[in-house]
Amino acid sequence: MSDFQKTKSMFHLPKGIIYLDGNSLGPLPKATPEKVGSMLTQEWGDMLITGWNKADWMGQPSRVGDRIGKLIGAPAGSVVMGDTLSIKVYQAVASALELNPTRKVVLSDNGNFPTDLYMVEGLLKSLDKGQELRLANPEDVEAALSEEIAVLMLTEVDYRTGRKHDMKALTQKAHALGILVIWDLAHSAGAVEVDLTACDADFAIGCTYKYLNGGPGAPAFIYVAPKHQENVRPALSGWLGHEAPFAFDIDYRPGTGIERMRVGTPPVIALTALESSLDIWDMVTTADVRAKSIELCDLFIAEVEKRCPSLELSSPRDGANRGSQISFKFEHAYAGMQALIDNGVVGDFRAPNSMRFGFTPLYIDEEDVIGAAAILERVINDNLWDNPKYQTRSRVT
Ligand SMILES: *Cc1c(COP(=O)(O)O)cnc(C)c1O
């Protein structure tokens, strides 16, 4: 049984704040500053360039990838770290399209996170082969599958509402029609149970600064199903994805297995911070995290609906159909969230009218949920949001 009291004690959680935004940026594990600090002085400082071998910085993207793999049902040697999620979207879609060369359509849904769609648009423009990005409503994706489609690219959990696609069923249906499937796990990894092997996903990608607490700008991951690894041509054919980077050959030859999805020099400092957070993940099971997350979300819905009848739930009511976040619609959502933050509850605002709250069992408990609902009640029912200082928008909302 996972001990969430213990895990909570392992995070730096500023006093007076209930942090319900770990779905955007996870908090700092207490062990991270020291772990990163000793990497800086003992490895970078003392080893200098020899750290690539002595501290095996070169093996870190795969080593950390294997640890992420355990959280998403991926076997060793099928996940590698690097770059940002936007880049991984590009890599996955480019490779998948080449594996299905006679078809011209990439299908996604219009609830997807914009960067995923932008990256595909940009890629298709560069390819200039008459390929198109087609969008369906999230609930119509299954009906939109056809033999015209080369690649289905979906984010499992909707970033606005938390609505969750049925990964296994959609993958199965897509495969039956000869479609390759890419899953974006940005709001899944560390939030819900994922079993890429059981779902038979072709590719998966995700970031590590949200539920996985790797820190701002922590590197992304990419999974390629073992059956595809030797056939995948990396579109971003960087030297560290080469079969023999230090042969410095003029010609590119893809590396073995998942290594070919590497591009350039890995972000060693950021990967070290992520490793420290993964030590906490080693203490829990994703099944326990998921069960607890559903409990916390259900409790929040019940408390908020009891206290704030003017807010409208925009997340699925049934825990099985959503990720680890809850959104409520409110006409003055931006000001409401600013007032809430000012009163010690940090969630976030998503345009046009959502107040979004992430529930992360590693460091959020029932007391936090009830405390947050009580503050939300004051902000809404006493109109605390109705103050000019809560109207000004910052660069990052
Ligand atoms: C958070 C998120 C991203 C962010 O991409 P970056 O390149 O890491 O900035 C992309 N896609 C989805 C679905 C996300 O939720």
Image (cartoon, rainbow, N blue to C red):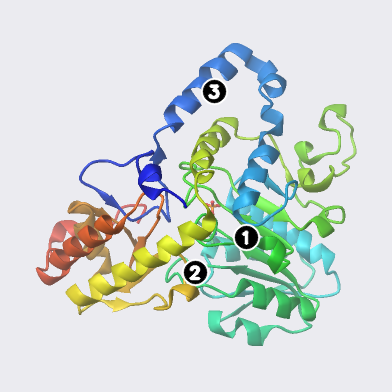
- Circle 3 is placed at which residue position? 39
Front label number (2 vs 1): 2
| Dot 2 amino acid type | Asp
Q: CA distance from mark 2 to mark 3?
A: 36 Å
> Any atom of ligand 1 within 8 Å of the CB at mark 3?
no
Residue 370 appears in which quarter of the rendering? bottom left
Q: Secondary structure at mark 2?
A: loop
At label 1, the amino acid type is Met
Q: Is residue 133 left or right of residue 110?
A: right
Looking at the image, residue 161 sits to the left or right of residue 167; the answer is left
Find numbered disc 1 in the image and state the secondary structure of the residue it sits on: helix
Label 2: which residue?
158
Q: Residue at x 84, y 42 (%)?
A: 255
Q: Is residue 385 visible?
A: no
Question: Please, what secondary structure does the residue beneath circle 3 have?
Answer: helix
Residue 269 visible in this rendered orientation of the protein: yes
Q: Which quarter of the picture shows residue 39? A: top right
Give the label, 2 or 3, closer to the camera.
3
x, y percent for residue 279: 52, 38
Farthest bottom residue in view: 143
Compared with residue 397, is residue 220 higher up or lower down, i.e. above or below?
Answer: above
Q: Which mark is residue 119?
A: 1
Amino acid found under the numbered disc labelled 3 = Met
Q: x%, y% of residue 218?
A: 53, 42
Q: Distance of mark 1 from mark 3, alpha carbons?
A: 34 Å
Q: Earlier in the sequence, mark 2 or mark 1?
A: 1
